[in-house]
Image (cartoon, rainbow, N blue to C red):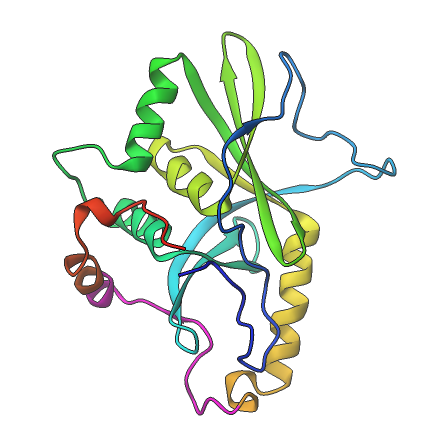
């Protein structure tokens, strides 16, 4: 299943993530990543966020990770793949397995090479696709790794790293949600009273996890 926005559901969606992205080293030794001025010289503002919940878009049966700013009510929903959603859900539910899964392995490799994940930043959205960076410190040098938001979040949760998003991304998402609510939300799209993205309750989350095989966690299926 592709990570996708709610195309064809009759409502505006926040953007999706890339279907596949390899981690590419885009930083340089000693490069100061946070607070760098973008093109045009305008300062970008980072807002710390937390994982508010995992959700399921009932209209597309697609998982959604919902980020919320720490000191406010704005949220940033990102449609993700089922494998990444399972990896995030597993960590939120404090589930452990005898063998390391994909994101556990990433953490182990990073630590073994002397790296430390400082933070994760949801940086931008282009062509309905979200992008993220993993800021890693190693031997006094800071590197920025290009990554999907879902993978970045799954790793950040495992090492208790902070998660940030560009303020303008939260602002745009807040405007879209307000417009959806004023337009009647999913009902206006002819979807009855079903919520466009409905948060999983504790029991539903546990049942969902019980149905999954451990080897499926962290796997992306196009």
State the image coordinates of residue 35 (x, y, percent, origin top left). 71, 31
Magenta highlight on residue 201: yes
Q: What is the quadrant of the C terminus in the image?
A: bottom left
Q: Residue at x 63, y 65 (%)?
A: 174
Looking at the rendering, which quadrant does residue 171 occupy? bottom right
Image check: 61 left or right of 100?
right
Looking at the rendering, which quadrant does residue 104 occupy? top left
Compared with 89, 184 (above or below) is: below
Q: Residue at x 58, y 17 (%)?
A: 142
Magenta highlight on residue 63: no
Residue situated furthest top in the rendering: 139
Q: Residue at x 45, y 59 (%)?
A: 2
State the image coordinates of residue 113 (x, y, percent, origin top left). 39, 13
Specify start and end residues of the magenta stretch as a single range. Answer: 190-205
Compared with 212, 157 (above or below) is: above
State the image coordinates of residue 198 (x, y, percent, origin top left). 39, 72
Dominant SS type (magenta): loop
Q: Nearer the viewer, residue 24 or 211?
A: 24
Q: What is the quadrant of the N terminus in the image?
A: bottom left
Q: Residue at x 40, y 12 (%)?
A: 114
Number of numbered discs: 0
State the image coordinates of residue 123 (x, y, percent, origin top left). 63, 42
Image check: 71 left or right of 62?
right
Q: Nearer the viewer, residue 58 or 159?
A: 58
Q: Nearer the viewer, residue 24 or 27?
A: 24
Compared with 215, 82 (above or below) is: below
Residue situated furthest left in the rendering: 98
Residue situated furthest right in the rendering: 40
């Amino acid at each position: 299943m592709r990570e996708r926005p709610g195309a064809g559901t009759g409502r505006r969606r926040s953007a999706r993530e890339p279907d596949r992205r390899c981690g590419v080293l885009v930083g340089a030794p000693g490069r100061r990543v946070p607070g760098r001025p973008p093109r045009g010289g305008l300062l970008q503002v980072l807002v710390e966020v937390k994982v508010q919940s995992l959700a399921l878009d009932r209209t597309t049966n697609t998982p959604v990770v919902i980020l919320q700013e720490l000191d406010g009510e704005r949220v940033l929903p990102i449609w993700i793949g089922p494998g990444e959603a399972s990896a995030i859900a597993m960590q939120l539910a404090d589930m452990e397995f005898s063998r390391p899964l994909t994101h556990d392995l990433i953490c182990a490799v990073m630590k073994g090479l002397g790296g430390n994940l400082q933070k994760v930043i949801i940086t931008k959205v282009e062509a309905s696709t979200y992008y993220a960076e993993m800021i890693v410190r190693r031997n006094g040098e800071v590197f920025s790794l290009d990554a999907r938001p879902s993978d970045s979040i799954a790793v950040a949760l495992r090492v208790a790293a902070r998660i940030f998003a560009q303020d303008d991304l939260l602002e745009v998402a807040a405007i879209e949600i307000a417009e959806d609510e004023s337009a009647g939300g999913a009902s206006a799209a002819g979807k009855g009273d079903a919520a466009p993205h409905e948060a999983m309750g504790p029991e539903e989350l546990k049942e969902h996890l019980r149905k999954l095989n451990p080897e499926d966690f962290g796997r992306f299926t196009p």
